[in-house]
Amino acid sequence: MTIQNPVAKTVSLSPVQTIDGAAFLRNDPAAKFMGIGGPTLEKLRCTGEGPRYSKLGKIVVYRISDLLAWAESRKVSSTSEKVGG
């Protein structure tokens, strides 16, 4: 699957799991989609600052729509503006 990510790059996503029409990514493909490192996304998840995720047994997956919503919630107009506020 190829999709446009939030920073206007086309990224080939593999593997993508689809459940009831919703596309899910594991940690590393989700991080690549967002343009950040896998360990960064793991840390954000542990601190509660990252995007919503689901656990399927021991596997963490991110819905692409949740990744996009998280990116949208972090928009700011200037460096003095707080993220998410």
Image: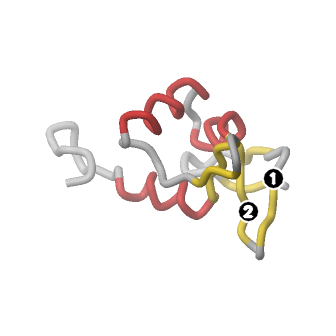
Q: Nearer the viewer, residue 65 or 61?
A: 61
13, above or below 40, in the image: below
Q: Quadrant of residue 18?
A: bottom right
Q: Secondary structure at mark 1?
A: loop
The answer to whether residue 51 is left or right of residue 10 is left
Q: Which residue is mark 2?
A: 23
User: At label 1, which amino acid type do we have?
Assistant: Val
Which numbered tag is attached to residue 16?
A: 1
Q: Nearer the viewer, residue 3 or 77?
A: 3
31 to 23, vertically: above or below:
above
Residue under the image location 69 percent in, 52 percent down: 56
Residue 43 place in picture, x, y as percent: 46, 29
Distance Cα–Cα, label 2 vs label 1: 6 Å
Percent position (x, y) of residue 4?
68, 55
Toward the bottom, the furthest residue is 20
Q: Furthest residue to the front? A: 57
Left or right, 48 with respect to 57, comes to left
The residue positioned 53% from the left and 60% from the top of the image is 66
